[in-house]
Image (tube, rainbow, N blue to C red):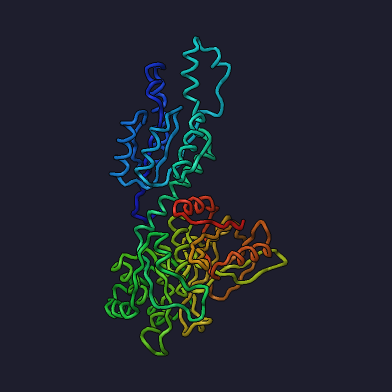
Amino acid sequence: MAGQQTKVKIGLFGIGLDTYWAQFKGLKERLEGYQQLIHTRVENDRITVVDAGLVDTLEKSADAAALFVREEVDLILLYVSTYALSSTVLPVVQKTKVPVVVLNLQPVSRIDYEAFNSLGSREEKTGEWLAHCQACSAPEIASVFNRAGIEYHLITGTLTDAESWQEIEAWVDAAYVAKVFRQTSIGLLGHYYGGMMDVYSDYTQIASVFGNHFEILEIDEVKELRDQVTQPEIEAMLAKFQSTFLVSNECSPSELNRAALTSCALQQLVDKHGLGAMAYYYEGRPGNPSEDIVTSIIAGNTLLTANHVPVAGEFEVKNVIAMKIMDALGAGGSFSEFYAMDFDDDIVMLGHDGPAHAAIAEGKVALVPLQIFHGKPGKGLSIQMTVRNGPVTVLSVLQERTGKIRLLVAEGQTEPGPILNIGNTNSRYRFTIGAKAYINSWSKAGPSHHCAVGIGHIAQKIEKLAAILGVEVIRVC
């Protein structure tokens, strides 16, 4: 998530029963130490932990709720340190009104029975047991939340096991992405590719789910900015091309200059409007300045995408949302569609023309000239790359007949092998259910024909983001 300025606030509070502290010496301090372990492990340079301490009375419950509301926390981690009364838990969650994750985490995987039973008194044994009885409160909290109509999520395990921490980190990452969207302006430049009906979107519905803002942009503004670009700015952009791309010798100086000029204007457009993503498509008439812009836009949009401002071609608004999710999760998010199927190798090929995510490429991406932009007017420079070999996640944002938003996700592998060297991105993808079943299942879920590809297996994080946003997830594999 490098490059993002967003910081997410995680509210943390432990629960216990104040009656115990006078009865069992050292128990409270021990439980507070466990809570501090969680605090320390969760907090980092993009996560602020707002710690309300150990809540064991109604008064402290009110204080915790006030703290979380004042600090505007994005997610609550509720640590069950020992048995606690649900009356001290409910008000915190009710008043804060943010997603809550209940941490039913024992200190260790099992009590040392021999050491436990060798303790001197029954009172001492009881105090030791109370440090391990987190599970006692889990059903009580769940029962009260169920009856109060409060959505919650339960993690059961130990303070140190990898599976529990993978889940905690996934929830925190999901809360981070949700906050990124609430602070994101998505630029809309141009119009849909005419007739591509699966791509058409309802901006209001999307913004109501993801919390983003849509900024309507004019191609004329890009021209104005382009006309003001200076020669030193062009030269600096050409140097960036050389450091970022493997620039083909076939690229003419005039095409490189044209692409650099447009890239400078695009960066200024993004800076001026504070954009965090953009969807675009335009054609213009032959010889028109607008055509000159859109036929020289791919290199600049690729640079933006690699710098955490994903850009989707063909005005694919839903897919730029998917790309932004991937990018905020540190997985990339490259614009893709199905290219072909290799039934002999049982793989699917995905790729696309236009901008790509250079940060997830297998090696350096190539900048190459195309004499024809297939299905689009004009000619110019394009990107050729493959996605890094290894685990990948494919994501689409669906909008159904009713307008309902869903997320569609699959995990697979990219692997080496022959690809199509046609000046586009394309890679070979293998899915555990096989190519035929994958294509059938994915297509019948009803996405547009575009998708976003990111590196790593991150479906668990996407599922948790969906839970925070209140949308459903379809997981193909």
Image location of residue 80, percent across then percent down: 45, 32
Q: Is 290 on the left-hand or right-hand side of 477?
A: left
Q: Nearer the viewer, residue 341 or 136?
A: 136
Number of numbered discs: 0
Let me know if residue 45 appears in the view: no
Let me know if residue 24 appears in the view: yes
Q: Nearer the viewer, residue 234 or 393?
A: 393
Q: Is residue 5 above or below residue 216?
A: above
**The residue positioned farthest toward the top in the image shown:** 120
Residue at image point 61% right, 67% down: 443
Residue at image point 40% right, 61% down: 208
Residue at image point 43% right, 77% down: 281
**The residue positioned farthest toward the front in the image shown:** 147
Q: Is 95 on the left-hand or right-hand side of 110?
A: left
Where the C terminus falls, by quadrant?
A: bottom right
Image location of residue 451, percent across then percent down: 53, 66
Q: Nearer the viewer, residue 291 or 410?
A: 410
The image quadrant of residue 100 is top left
Q: Is residue 237 above or below residue 175?
A: below
The image quadrant of residue 236 is bottom left
Q: Which of 92 and 420 is in front in this view?
A: 92
Image location of residue 237, percent across then percent down: 35, 71
Image location of residue 201, percent across then percent down: 46, 71
**The residue positioned farthest toward the right in the image shown:** 344
